[in-house]
Amino acid sequence: MTAQKKSMITEEFARHVDSGLKQDTSTTYNEVLQLRDDIWTYISNELDFEEDFGCKDIESFSDLNGEHLGRMRNFTGAKDTPVDWVIHSDIGQPKNTFTNIHLTFWMKDCTDVPHLGMAFGTLPEAFYYIDIMPRYELVTNPEHCVKYYDDLNPVALAHQSELFEQGVKPFHAAMPFIRASLSPCAVAGVGPLNFFQDCAKEKIWAVVKHWVELVKAAKVDTDQAACDERRHRDYQQRKSIVYLDPANPIAERMVGKEAADRLVRILAGEERNGAAYSHD
């Protein structure tokens, strides 16, 4: 692994990859995957989505050795649902340590409700991240911060307190860009499975339910200029986060550059049937 690519991933995982060790993380993987699937079931029962079959051919895909490696499904919000694009994916083989699981909801430009981002996995301990992703610079738009983040602040603070009290190291991304992409109320960590089960899951569910209520109460913005500006920013935000994901070099090693590049394009919403909101 080159020094440049190594600098993109967490110190813990870089050390594990360089050691060449393979650790069976199936127990942790099954737990975090089950939470992702439970959250998807809950949200899809609360909001209306339609599957986008633009990447149907890789709903299940394999690594360079022909072994099953991951799944990719995508959804769009129904006509009256303010969600634009949904990523439902996972990649990795828990018996070989690394897994990366996504569930992300990108909003349409007609509302200013934040996007919802989630990632889970094994690094090799339980990795979790959930955040309602800002659509404005919060320092220069404090009203947006108050409107959408004040009610989540107790959840984020409680999570930080529990990390400290139980001696669990907070998740600290190696890339400044990744740290800059997090809101003040992101809930993220890498720690023992018992901490994930006993502490983190409760906070993750609190964020999910908060966001669902925000979506249900979303107001339609009829200011076309504001919508156009949001659409442009949303695409740039999504593209940057996806193309600079520190897990991309690992995916490339597993499936090859061509297939990894396509996965990135799909995650960025650049291969889809319903592309009304994906680009400027």
Image (spheres, helix red, strand yellow):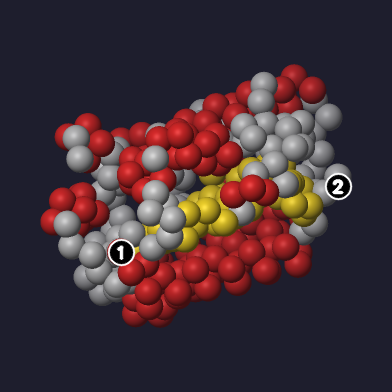
Check disc 1 and report its element: helix, strand or loop: helix
Amino acid type of the residue that numbered disc 1 sits on in the rendered structure: Asn
Q: Judge the density around disc 1: few (<14), some (14-19), many (≥20) Cα neighbours within 10 Å.
A: some
Q: Is residue 207 above or below residue 116?
A: below
Q: Residue at x 86, y 45 (%)?
A: 79
Say above or below: 12 vs 180.
below
Please provide percent x and percent y for residue 255. 41, 45
Foreground of the two, 216 or 125: 125
Mark 2 vs mark 1: in front = 1
Q: Residue at x 44, y 56 (%)?
A: 66
Q: Is residue 185 left or right of residue 39?
A: left
Image height check: is 196 above or below 169?
A: below
Residue positioned 33% across, 40% down in the render: 249
Within 10 Å of the Cα at label 2, are there few (<14), some (14-19), or many (20+) other Cα atoms?
Answer: few
Q: Position of residue 17 (x, y in %)?
A: 21, 53
- Judging by the rendered image, the residue that carries numbered circle 1 is 96
Would you say 16 lies left or right of 228 here? Answer: left
Q: Residue furthest front?
A: 66
> Is 44 situated left or right of 162 in this image?
right
Which dot marks residue 8? none
Q: Is residue 164 visible?
A: no
Quarter holding residue 67? bottom left
- Mark pair 2, 1: CA separation: 42 Å
Residue 62: x %, y % from top left? 47, 54
Q: Residue at x 59, y 49 (%)?
A: 58
Q: Quadrant of the N terminus?
A: top left
Q: Are marks 2 and 1 in contact (CB under 8 Å)?
A: no
- Mark 2 or mark 1: name the one nearer the start of the chain: 2
User: Dividing the picture into quarters, in which one does residue 144 lie?
Assistant: top right
Name which residue type carries label 2.
Answer: Asp
Which residue does the numbered mark 2 point to in the structure image? Answer: 80
